[in-house]
Structure formats: structure tokens, C-alpha cells
Amino acid sequence: MADLLLRNVSLPDGRTGVDVLVDAGRIVNVSPRINADARETIDAAGQLLSPPFVDPHFHMDATLSYGLPRVNRSGTLLEGIALWGELKPTLTQDAIVERALAYCDWAVAKGLLAIRSHVDVCDPRLLAVEALLHVRDQVKPYLDLQLVAFPQDGALRSANALDQLKRALTMGVDVVGGIPHFERTMAHGADSVRVLCELAAERGLPVDMHCDESDDPMSRHIETLAHETLRLGMRGRVTGSHLTSMHSMDNYYVSKLIPLIREAGVHAVANPLINITLQGRHDTYPKRRGMTRVPELMAAGINVAFGHDCVMDPWYAMGSADMLEVASMGLHVAQMTSQDGMRACFDAVTVNAAKVMGLEGYGIAPGNRADFVLLQARDPVEAIRLRATRLKVFRAGKLVAETPAATARIDLPGRPGHVDWRLLR
Ligand SMILES: [Zn+2]
């Protein structure tokens, strides 16, 4: 007898009326009307069973610190970086661990079971690195946490940052980070990309850089990142995060750049909530949106994912680990309102994000670990529209979170109160 049978689920690829059989923590069968017994059977009534949400870009060392030591008054990226600099010397390992674990609780409740988090390596004590390595181990049974060694103050610009970054990698951090647009000059930015990519190639590690998070159309470090990826044979293992300067670039230049990114197999991560909030701050009107060219990158065959980036930290006062909110903002900012466009936004917080992180065995298919989320929605578009309730969240076949469906307690004669979000479709 198997452990778990879900009857009549819909899948993100459009299949409906599918059963999913789980045993010993793995998916063993995905097909219509499975003839098997299980210790527990759930009738999904046609609702959407999605692989878990994946956040490919986050800052877990800063999360839930909003207001410490003060609030970001201008709301800009640069005041956020300055504020983080004020907060850093007062951080304790216990406080970082406690906030990170609290965020992981939120994440699991929202069906978000894999997160790539940058961790600042510019503090000589590497407190946050130690704290998040500890958190990575602690949450492993229910959440895949991947860490990026992130030189927030500049790998070359900040004294000893490069040595501290190497120390963090030796301690077990998974990915090499960078921030070329924050180095002192364009030339230093390009140097930092080269040095960091060489370091990653030497150690056999992936790369994920904050790249061109700027409205300056001349911020073109993505070009160097793609070139270094090709030169060092790192296709598929390099990610350019943010890429907001692409929004403002000359169209002719972009027509050459996008094929280069594609050729290099560099993944792109947009952070819609943060990009729409932080970019265009020097504009009067019209104000640029600032998010990178998501539909154009996707159309060129580049893997594009959406990240949450910040939740209640020096840069952003909002957020709740809800990747459907991220997908919804991405959809609006990129004007991806066609049926295909909306489904692509769902992919950007699930399957595409899993590719960025290099997750193996991701997806609802036989042989994979039984990780999935039952949503109160019939399909990906409805899930985004409703920020659908995560009815049940499973990790390795075990229920790790559940949320009851919304119910209205109103009784009209002959019409018992209920909430059916799907009534009008
Ligand atoms: Zn970031």
C-alpha cells in the first residue's frame, strides 16, 4: 500500500483529471485514474497541484529587519545600502538566525520550498555567513536554501572583500556573487566580473551577480558577464540578477546583447517588486519602470525567473514570501497579459527559478521527491489572480503546511453563504 494518493488534480502544463501516487517520499505515478490503495487519499476536486514555488533571488541576512536601526526615508537603493551599513556592526548571529528561521516559516506556509539567498561577505566577522550556513542545515528537511557570497560594498571597492568572499566559499557558501555596477568605475566593474568568474571557474561553482541594477543605459556589465561565461566554459551556471539598465538601453545595442546572453546560456532574474519600487528614482515624469526586458529575453530562449529580493528590510517594507505576488507584479510591470504571458509568469516563480538554482528532480513526475503545493485555483492564471490559498504543502510526501479555504458565513434564504472565487469564469 502506498503512502498518499491525490485524486483529480490539475497540473500547470494544462493536464486535468490526473492522479498522483506517492510512496516513501517519492512520486511513483502521475496518470489519470490510478488503480492503487494508499494510507491517505485526498480528493483535489480539480484544483491545481504545482511543484513548490522557488525564489531565485533573496537576502535572508537582511530580512525582517525593517526599521533597524531606522527606516529608509528616501526609499532609494543607495539609502538602503547606507542603512544596511549602519545596521551591520550591531548584528548578532542569534538575531540573524532567528529572523531567517521566522522567514522560512512564512516561506513554507506559502509553498516556497527553495530559496537562493545572497549573504553579505563585507563584514570581516562573516557573522551573517556563519548564521545562514547554520540556517541552511537546520531547514534542510523542508526547504532548500542555497547561499551566494555577495560583496555588497563591492568586491574590489571594499577593503578585503575579495579575501572575505573566498573565506565564505571555503566555509561552504554555494555560489559566487558580485555587484559590478557598485564598483568605483566601469573598468573596475568589468575587472570584478572577470576576477569573480575566474574564481568560480577555479572552484567549480556557479555565479550569480547583482548586475546593472541601475537606470544608467551605459551600465553594460551583463555584456562582460556573458563574455566571461563563454570564455570560461560556464554555460548554464551563470546568472545575471536585476539587469535593470537593459530597460533604458538603446534598442540597437540590445539587439546585439540579447543574442550574446542567449549564446552564453546566462540565466536572467528580474525582481519585479523591488525593480518597480527602486528604479526610476532620478526621473521626474515620465518615470521609467526599470524592470529588465522580460518578454524579449524569454522570446529569445533565455531562461528568465522572478525573485522576491527583499521582505521587510532596509530596501523594502512590504512582502510576505508569496511568490504569486511576485509573479503578479512581474505580469503587470512587463504587461504580460496574454494567456501565454501570464502562464510564463507562473513558470518564472516555479520551473524557470528551479533551473536558475540548478535544482535536480524538480517537478511533478515519477521518480522526483514528492514536493508540491495544492492551490485553491484551477490553473496558473487563476492562481496568480487570486494569490491562491495554499491548501496543502508537501515536502518528501509529508504535509508541512496547510491553510483552510476561505468561507463566508452569510446565510440568505435558500442560499447558504460560501466563497467561490471561480464563480464568474
Ligand atoms: Zn538582491
Image (cartoon, rainbow, N blue to C red):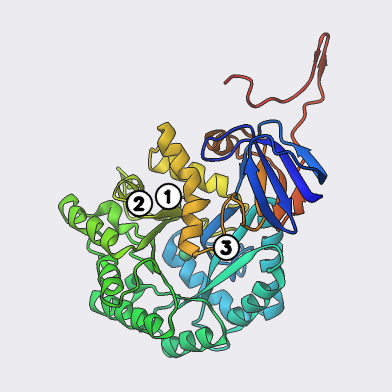
Q: Nearer the viewer, residue 255 or 89?
A: 255
Q: Write the residue at 67% across / 80% down.
A: 92
From the top left corner, tell me how far across and down residue 264 is, in percent. Answer: 29, 65
Amino acid identity at mark 2: Gly
Q: Earlier in the sequence, mark 3 or mark 2?
A: 3
Residue to which mark 2 is pinned: 290
Task: Name the residue nearer the viewer: 265 or 31.
Answer: 31
In depth, the one of 47 and 323 nearer the eye is: 47
Q: Amino acid at mark 3?
A: Ile
In the displayed structure, 199 sits above or below 13; it is below
Tell me the quadrant of the picture where the C terminus can be found. Answer: top right
Residue 2 placement, left or right of 288? right
Label placed on residue 400: none
Could you tell me which residue is drawn at 35 percent across and 73 percent down?
234
Residue assigned mark 1? 276
Which element carries disc 1, helix, strand or loop?
Answer: helix
| Residue that mark 3 sits on | 115
First in residue order: circle 3 vs circle 1:
3
Classify mark 3: helix, strand or loop.
strand
Density class for disc 1 (Cα within 10 Å; few <14, some 14-19, many ≥20) is some
Residue 374 pos. (x, y %):
68, 42
Whether residues under marks 3 and 2 lie with C-beta atoms below 8 angstroms apart, the answer is no
Q: Amino acid at mark 1?
A: Ile
Measured as percent of width and height from the top left, residue 94 is found at: 72, 77
Q: Identify the residue shown where x is 60% and y is 78%.
A: 128
Q: Identify the image quadrant of residue 368.
A: bottom right
Tell me the residue at 34%/68% (across/down): 235
Corner quadrant of residue 238: bottom left
Tag 2 near tag 1, CB within 8 Å: yes
- The single residue placed furthest to the left in the displayed view is 252
Q: Depth check: give the residue in front, 203 or 269.
A: 203
First in residue order: circle 2 vs circle 1: 1
